[in-house]
Image (spheres, helix red, strand yellow):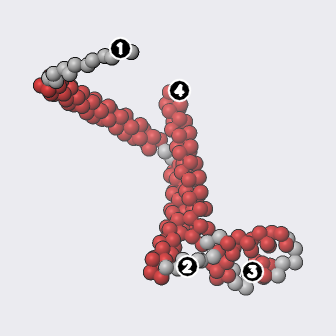
Amino acid sequence: MAQTKYEDQKADHMSWIQWININLDNAKEFYEEVKINLREITSQIISKVSKELRFFISKLTTVDFFCGSITLGIMVFASLFLAFGLGLVGYQVFLWIKDGVWSEFATIEVFNFLFENTLLAQWLDNPESWLGLQKIIEWLLYNIPVSVALIVPSIMVLVGMMCVTVVALTLRFYQFKSKENI
């Protein structure tokens, strides 16, 4: 087997430092050009978006504002339920940190408070029909925490209303644009 001998080459540190300095200068120039171009692109985008928003808002009718206010009201109502659910979880965490015991709040407690002495509560206590439904509802009331019963539906409503709002605004925008082009 032939053995290759490697000779140590003298390292020229000054050439490496010069190469690094040249590349750093090139990177600084590139960064400055990117910053200038991004600033220009951003200003063009903001200008175009503000122009389209002014056009869109000027075309909205009272029916649009009425439907928008109903949507906003539903979203505020769902946000309150979400805040109550998160507040309840925060309270449970506070009690757990303080005592070391997790406090459970089952939905049945809220149900009993809200529906005491109603037909629904009487049916749940002593059903004469729909026995399977009664067992399902009773299981849900005893096993689902109040915080989950507040948080999950409110998130679903909020996401649903945001999707409906985006779709409605998009359709309305294209309606206005198509009328403008005619």
Q: Left of 12 or right of it: where is 90?
A: right
Mark 4 residue type: Ile
Q: What element carries label 4?
A: loop
Going from the N terminus, do you reach mark 4 or mark 3 first? 3
Relative to 158, residue 95 above or below: below
> Is the Cβ of the residue at disc 4 closer than 8 Å to that at disc 3?
no
Q: Nearer the viewer, residue 89 or 53?
A: 89
Tag 3 near tag 2, CB within 8 Å: no
Determine the residue positioned at 82% across, 82% down.
126
- 122 displayed left or right of 88: right
**Nearest the camera: 180 or 108?**
108
Q: Where is residue 1 in the image (x, y as percent from the top left)?
A: 39, 15
The residue under label 4 is 182
Q: Mark 3 points at which residue?
A: 121
- Find disc 1 in the rendering and name its residue: 2
Nearer to us in this view, 37 or 15: 15
Q: Nearer the viewer, mark 4 or mark 2?
A: 2
Q: Pointers 1 and 4 in contact (CB under 8 A)? A: no
Earlier in the chain: of badge 3 and badge 1, it is: 1
Which residue is found at the position 56% from the left and 48% from the top? Answer: 163
Neighbours of disc 2 within 10 Å: few (<14), some (14-19), many (20+): some
Q: Distance between the residues labelled 3 and 2?
A: 25 Å
User: Above or below — where is 123 with respect to 13?
Assistant: below
